[in-house]
Amino acid sequence: MALTTLDAGTALVVIDLQNGLRHAPTAPYPVPEVITRTAELADAFRAHGAPVFLVRVTGAPDGWDATPGRNETPSASRARPEGWDQVVPELAGHPEDITVTKRTWGAFHGTDLDLLLRRRGITQIVVTGVATSIGVESTARAAHEHDYHVTLATDAMTDLDAEAHRNSVERIFPRLGERGTAAEIIELLARTRP
């Protein structure tokens, strides 16, 4: 669906824009472009008093809690540099933002994201981040199942594979909610929020 509305209770949910993924080989957009567009969205949300949720993924150093299907086992896990799981500086440092830490692909399972959203009266989320077909899609599916209105900022997300990104954007996301560019969402936010 094309972008038409933002509820009064809309929040930005940013998936896995963290130091360890900054240089991942992605398509169709490089991660730095996604970070820039997401930072613009976050600034606009903050300026209009709308909450920003920064979701980061982490794991135990020995990999015991790795998500199944990631081709990682505890013995095969690779060491990650210090700070790999910290939100990128372009988005960090805003005390009003809410950080959610996850250990699976999606931001709802095993976290308090749903509770944090509901306590703030959030009925709609705008989702950005990496990877489109993994963390972003998993979060969007769960949000839809939790009865949130879902909006996907299609140029503020990217994937490890261009075809996987295209499949999510063109085939999956229209079933879950509305889609728009970061600029379109910012424009709609300016028109609908004081």
Image (cartoon, helix red, strand yellow):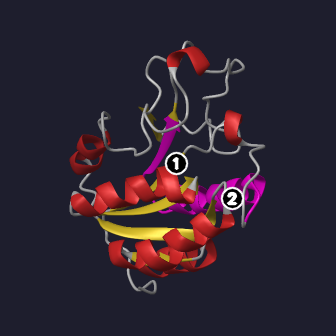
Q: Quadrant of the C terminus?
A: bottom left
The residue to which callout 1 is attached is 15
Count residues near mark 2 (Cα–Cα under 10 Å), then give few for <14, some for 14-19, many for 20+: many
Q: Amino acid at mark 2?
A: Val
Q: Residues within 10 Å of mark 1 (few under 14, many from 20)?
A: many
Specify whether 68 is left or right of 42: left
Residue 102: give x, y in percent of width and height.
42, 34
**Residue 153 placed where, x, y %?**
54, 69
Q: Amino acid at mark 1?
A: Ile
| C-alpha span from label 1 to label 2 | 11 Å
Q: Which residues are magenta?
A: 29-56
Q: Answer with the quarter of the image where residue 164 lies.
A: bottom right
Looking at the picture, tell me which residue is in the foreground, 167 or 125: 167
Screen quadrant of the N terminus: bottom left
Nearest the viewer among 53 and 192 is 53
From the image, give the main secondary structure of the stretch colored magenta: helix
| Residue indicated by mark 2 | 34
Residue 39 magenta-highlighted: yes
Q: Is 144 displayed left or right of 179 in the figure?
A: left
x and y, in percent, of residue 71 in the image: 55, 34
- The image position of residue 41, as x and y in percent, is 59, 62
| Secondary structure of residue under mark 2 | helix
Residue located 67% across and 27% down the image:
84
- For residue 101, say whether it is visible: yes
In the depicted view, which residue is nearer to us: 118 or 64?
Answer: 64
Reading the chain from its start, which is encountered first: label 1 or label 2?
A: 1
* Residue at the image point whose x is 31% and y is 58% from the top: 143
